Image (cartoon, helix red, strand yellow):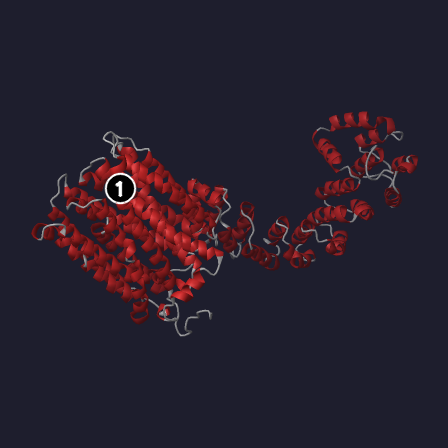
Amino acid sequence: MTEFQPSPEIAPLTLAQRKHGKRYYYSYALFNSLSYAALAEAVVLLMLLRLGGTASWVGAVSAMAYATLPFMVLGYRSVRKIGLARNAGLFWALRSLFAGFMIAAPWAQQHLGGNAGLWFVLAGATGFFTARAVGMVSFMGILTELTTPREKGALIANSFMLFQGGGLLMTVLIALFLGVEASLYRYQLFFTAGLLTGLAAAYSLWKLPESGAFRQGAPFSLRRELGWLVGTGGRRWFFAMMAVIPITQGILRMFIVLVAKQGYGLSDQQVVLYVLTGIIGGIAASYAYGMFLDKLGSRPLLVLTGIVDIGAVLGILFLPVSISPILLGALFFISGAVHIAFQASLQHYFLSITDVEHQLPQGIITQSVGGIAGGLALYLGGVGLEAIEQVVASPTDPLLHFRWFYGGMLVLLVLRTAILFRIPRLRSEGIRDSLNALLSPWDWRAVNAVKRAVAIQSEDEETRSLEFIMRSGSGIYREELESLLQSPSYVVRERALVALALVKPDMPLIDALLEDVRGNPFTTAPQAAYWLGHWQVKRAVSVLREAVGSADETLSARAIQALVEVEDRESLPMIRERFQASLHALVIVCGARALAQWDGAEAYPRLLEKLNEPVPPQARDELALSVARLAGLYDMFYRDLGMLRRQPEQLFSEWRERYGARDGEALLASVRAGSVVKVQLEQALAANRDSFREWFQAGTEAWLARSPESIAPHLGFLMTFLLLSPAGNHLA
């Protein structure tokens, strides 16, 4: 199949157009929230119950939100003719006008008799959700047009937050206006308000800018799109997720209203107040996921949301017979939060796994299949709930049939959780890291600071974001650190390199470090070389070899250290050459370690020769330690050298006990006085000639031949340790 390529004359929206479009999109989200709360939420179910509707009617009306989704295919054709914005605006207006059936339902119930009012509500819901389905096709394309990959989560979550905020406002008005015993005609006023605000939302959609990219492409082909959808195992699990979540979410969210209304016998006003807590939960979820969706990715948030959802169902199972307002309110809160969290995460994941060519048709297929499954589940759930009530009804526990019903739902929730664990990770963080970030106040501050740094792009903001990243202790900021490593500011790059201790490397981050080694000598290149070695990046070898000869000797030293870390023994000749030519402390330190590790006994004369040169004092100890490493006495010499600095009297006391019997040349007294002479070392070497290996004997003799009569104290200390030691690789 030929990959879709947008026509070259179609340019994406400019930044100004995206900014303009986001304003209209947020306006749509606000008006739509007012409309939806009045036309399709708990208020409709409450009026349905007032008209005499049973759980089966509730299931049937609720099912329309899902069962009408296959009509999205009409929207695909419409988008290609009139574009995303006009398709969404036109059918959102039709959606709102169908509310006229709901407005007329009380009249029909009174004048036509029977179940006429119920049928009017069902007809209104069917038309409402059918037009909505046709218009919904546009939204994935609209989100793609208005955002970049790094900000789509923010737009999704912010629009959901506005949606929940407007819904909260409308629900508060409904709760206040309905009172304890509301007339059915009061519901008509809210349906009218929903119709008008829906038309305002449609106008905002009509005004959205678009590039026209989504008016291209081949006609809708079910066979082609199903082939793409099942083409990989990851996409198959994605399809399973899109199908199963509407089933569980529809039942859990809608039927909790029945738990409050029928299980506890609450008034309409009381139920609406509980619905308010669910909306507040949705606002909380919108805010949290707006902060973290783009940072963590959608997969871990989907999994964590599913686990929270299971906790809510378990809470319903253990609701007390006598109402507990706090517990019931908490369950409504969690239900509302989970609903919005799932919607935001699903949209984000859908946009991440699809491309422009497949977004609209895949939205049709996945949402249609999920809609059919969810609608059927809602209807069967209503019928099943009635059947369970007839079998297990208990006069002492009015919630018993709900317990059985939601207990059965646990099986589906376990299946759903297994599916969520199998969907591809894409560019998501791990579940444990994501949970830690969500629970960490420092990560909340770090994510907010990172967003500010990206938006403002000033040195102060970038530095501030790095401070919060370091305090968070979290390893989820690879992309941000990769970007900050390319900052023109040395201070920012330096702090970003320090923060790399928190993260695991990926290819973009490694590429940024390689570029830093090449382009930033005398500043941050040495730190970049250190991390390439620390992470043992094999592909960095050629860049590190070049850095060994750099005029920046600190970079040269770190490159040597890194080459040792990646086990590049072929670089040994150039390391020897740089070591012998340099008097830079860090080059000597790193070079000595490399020679001791790779050159074996051949390094011994080179290290001794370097000790005779005027090397910086801070490099002498490292040279001596490297010699001790060759002798296999590194740990012992390290301990003795540290004690010489901190507790010299204690050290010499131990040396008298350890070496006194072997000290025929009075070396211990001379070392303590700092006055070792060459003849003492020559006599000690000759006295034990048969005890030493050839490389040590010959190397030491050659070194002594070139040494002055008075031996430097640090050399006297090292050679006394080696000559008197009863163990080591230098002994035969």
Q: Is residue 160 left or right of residue 491?
A: left
What element does badge 1 sit on? helix
Across and down, in percent, residue 36 comes to: 24, 52
Query: Quick check: 337 above or below 515?
Result: above
In this rendering, is residue 402 above or below 218? Answer: above
> Taking the image as drawn, is residue 279 in sight?
no
Q: Residue at x 84, y 26 (%)?
A: 660
Q: Quadrant of residue 212?
A: bottom left
Looking at the figure, which quarter contains the C terminus?
top right
Query: Hey, what amino acid is under mark 1?
Result: Ala
Q: Relative to 554, is 65 on the left or the right?
A: left
Name the spot of residue 143 as percent of width and height, x first.
36, 60
Crowd class of label 1 (few under 14; some 14 to 19; many from 20; radius 10 Å): few
Question: Residue 601's x, y, as percent?
Answer: 82, 46
Residue 667 higher or lower than 583, as above or below:
above
Residue behind mark 1: 387
Left or right placement of residue 194 versus residue 4 in this view? left
Residue at position x 31%, y 36% from top?
403
